[in-house]
Image: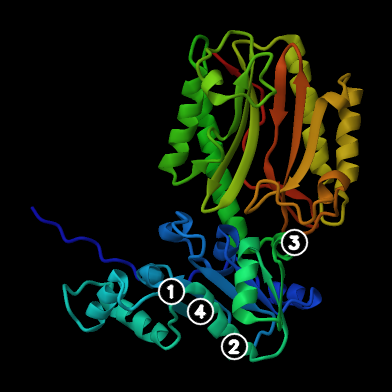
Amino acid sequence: MTTTPAPIRVQSPAVPLCDMGRIQALMKAAEVDLICGKEDNALYYLSGHYSDSTLCHFYDDWACALVPANPHVPAALLIQEYDLAYQVTKPTWLPELRVYGSSWSSAGTLLSDIQAGRGIETELRKPLRAAYERTRATRQADLAEAVQAYVREHFGDRRIRIACDDMRYHAKLKEKLGDKVEVIDALPLLRRIRAIKTQAEIALLTKAAQINAKALQAAATAIHPGAPWGAMVQAYRQSLAISGAKPLGERGMLFNSGPDGSFVLDHDYVEQKTFTSGETVVMDAICEYRLYRADMARTAVIGTASAEQRRMFAAVRKALEEAESMMRAGTHTSAITQHAAQVMSACGFRPELTTLTMHPIGLQVFDYTESRHESEGWTLESDSVVNFEVFYRDSEYGGVHLEDSVLISAAGARALAPEPRDLLELH
């Protein structure tokens, strides 16, 4: 019996991840005329372009998004001709698409053949011909020339300020565009822009948090006396892979047990060990889904928890939950951290042995708007997403750790993936 394959879905542009009005307002405040986003995070955030050929980094200079401060100038995605077919089924939301490449390359020749009607007609061919025709007038030989052509067309010879997130590319931009262009680092501006999440970003972060929570649960099922630590890590990785996510780092951060469970250890060393009854287990799980990060921590005990393990866990949970109860737009994070330290002290534990870290999360795990925010704190804003880590480190019991990603509003904080926070007793 033969079956007819389902037709390929040629999509309309996705809902933008970014808020163009916010971007252009902050650009004007920073006196930036044009953003050139080349790195994976900026490229995806600004344009939605997420092809494997881009993410594989075959070449340093492959694609970029150009976003002007002037709303009357069209923003553009610049890609290699090889990625044109990707844009048929996953088109950018930016108003302009430009292609570069050599017409005599294999990809260029194939596109010419398709344009001429040669070969087998597939569902992709008609929209691919339309995309090829639409981009042919602005086609350039390489990415730098494509940027140069865009700037000359929309800015002429006037002096402009470009913010580019790839510091290595600054010299090439200066070479192509001349002395009338000032090139600055775009990362500080992009981080300020990304501090407030759009609904599309919140949806992605929620999906990432849900995937991470499920994978952490899978890791917990692999924990029992005598089992190898590596089984826990492998269960976490496999669950992520099934859901289209992947761990950050080699293991997804920190999966340890016993007295050394509060340290990040060499995974080759760690995964040869086996679980022992009575040990605490820290599962600090960090993953990536479509470049967005998820970060969740839970604590378990192998067997039945002792009175001291329960007391430590209760203090950590109390500190986290009281801290989260204070989180709302307009609150300074330093007040929240100070209160959590007071809770730990009141419960009879040393605050100096407790990691109390508030961090925004998004396209980075620690997605601070400014570097000083890490040590000095900042004022929470509505539609930002943050984690507050409470991690007590004990030389006898190891670590006790809890954290979740929460969405901030004027009314308070809401967990993206609400999951039980009980101390897990695994037999």
Task: Identify the image quadrant of residue 11.
Answer: bottom left
Give the spatial CA distance, label 4 vs label 2. 10 Å
The percent coordinates of residue 249 (x first, y second) are: 56, 38
Q: Earlier in the sequence, mark 4 or mark 1?
A: 1
Graded by Cα atoms within 10 Å as few (under 14), some (14 to 19) or many (20 or more), the crowding at tag 1 reads few
- Which residue type carries mark 2? Arg
Horizontally, residue 343 falls left or right of residue 320, namely right
Vertical order, 414 against 229 (above or below): below
Vertical order, 141 against 241 (above or below): below
- Which residue type carries mark 1? Ser
- Foreground residue, 315 or 133? 133
Residue 92 circle label? none
Horizontally, residue 117 falls left or right of residue 270, namely left
Give the spatial CA distance, label 2 vs label 3. 26 Å
Q: Nearer the viewer, mark 3 or mark 4?
A: 4
Mark 4, residue position: 146
Instruction: Determine whether the residue tagged by mark 1 lies in a helix, strand or loop.
Output: loop
Instruction: Determine whether the residue tagged by mark 2 lies in a helix, strand or loop.
Output: helix
The percent coordinates of residue 78 (x first, y second) are: 50, 74
- Which residue type carries mark 4? Ala
Q: Earlier in the sequence, mark 2 or mark 1?
A: 1
Q: Earlier in the sequence, mark 4 or mark 2?
A: 4
Mark 2, residue position: 152
Residue 12 circle label? 1
**Do callouts 3 and 1 mark residues in contact (Cβ within 8 Å)?**
no
Mark 3, residue position: 188
Q: Nearer the viewer, mark 3 or mark 1?
A: 3
